[in-house]
Image: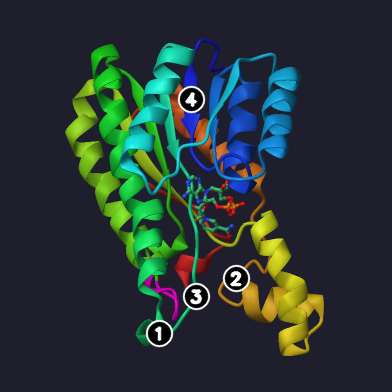
Amino acid sequence: NLQGKSAVITGSTSGIGLAIAKALAAQGCDIMLNGLGDAGEIEQIRSGLEKESGRKVLYNGANMMKPDEIAGLVKAAETGLGKVDILVSNAGIQHVSPVEDFPIDKWDAIIAINMTATFHLVRAAVPGMKARKSGRIINMASAHSLVASPFKSAYVSAKHGLLGFTKTIALELATFGITANCISPGYVWTPLVEKQIPDTMKARGMTKEQVMNDVLLAAQPTKQFVQTEEIAAMALYLCSDMAKNITGANMVVDGGWTAA
Ligand code: NAD
């Protein structure tokens, strides 16, 4: 039960972040949404979640590439919701390219959004958490925090870095009632992944099933996508009192990928 708690969840206008926002709100948590997208669609998500949960649901459009906007997001949550008990750093992007062709701006954006933004978020949220001697920090990493895939140099670097950062702050915050952990999903069924399938079918002359098993799920022993609700359930568990001794951990939800 998260009655009386409030959470900032970055990248919560879609996919995993939105599923986490729904799960936390369903447990009584007030929510600060964040993410890019069409203003009308985002307002529909915000008001829909507010209606179905009966909780206070706010939105702030901070760009995770901009440190001042990130600090502003945390400030807006502290003002609008009273405090930040739970910080979920989830916004992320991907780009796939051989390293010698990797666009420099894509490298910079992935490092900024998938890794450095978490530093700025934590830096802004920790003073309030320390003062209350309680907090939950959940950083969305990936199986790519532990293993690599070719052509994903920026993403793999950022997610490995994010895990190192999370372990470090877990040590710093351990005596303040604050936990910091990563969740590391394998392939999750999100709009982003779903949208890639028709194009890949065309490009490779494959059936939908071949694309899913031989391309996307090649590394995932279960040959099944993880569902966003499963990641949200892990986030909910990490927010619970029973998880107070889980810190600096990497909670892997990857259908066996990193066991291989
Ligand atoms: P998604 O594309 O559905 O959602 C990404 C969210 O991040 C969106 O809300 C988007 O608006 C937001 N975002 C992107 N750039 C932003 C920016 N500059 N500023 C603010 N918000 C920004 O993707 P998803 O699959 O839900 O991914 C969420 C997280 O989970 C990412 O960190 C991703 O790396 C991680 N992850 C996803 C998978 C997967 O298979 N889908 C696997 C492992 C890890």
For label 4, being within 8 Å of ligand 1 is answered no
Residue linked to disc 1: 101
Single out the mark in the foreground, 3 or 4: 3
- Please indicate whether residue 232 sits to the left or right of residue 150 in the image: right
Please provide the residue range marked out in magenta.
148-154
- Where residue 174 sits, quadrant-wise, is top left
Compute the Cα span from label 1 to label 3: 10 Å
Q: Position of residue 150 (x, y in %)?
A: 44, 81
Pick the residue in front: 110 or 187.
110
Single out the mark in the foreground, 3 or 2: 3
Helix, strand or loop at disc 1?
helix
Quadrant of the drawing holding the N terminus: top right
Q: Position of residue 238 (x, y in %)?
A: 45, 33
Amino acid residing under circle 2: Pro
Compute the Cα span from label 2 to label 1: 31 Å
Helix, strand or loop at disc 2?
loop
Amino acid residing under circle 3: Val
Residue linked to disc 3: 96
Asked if residue 150 is among those painted magenta in the image, a careful observer would answer: yes
Amino acid residing under circle 1: Asp
Q: Position of residue 121 (x, y in %)?
A: 34, 36
Q: Position of residue 244 (x, y in %)?
A: 36, 27
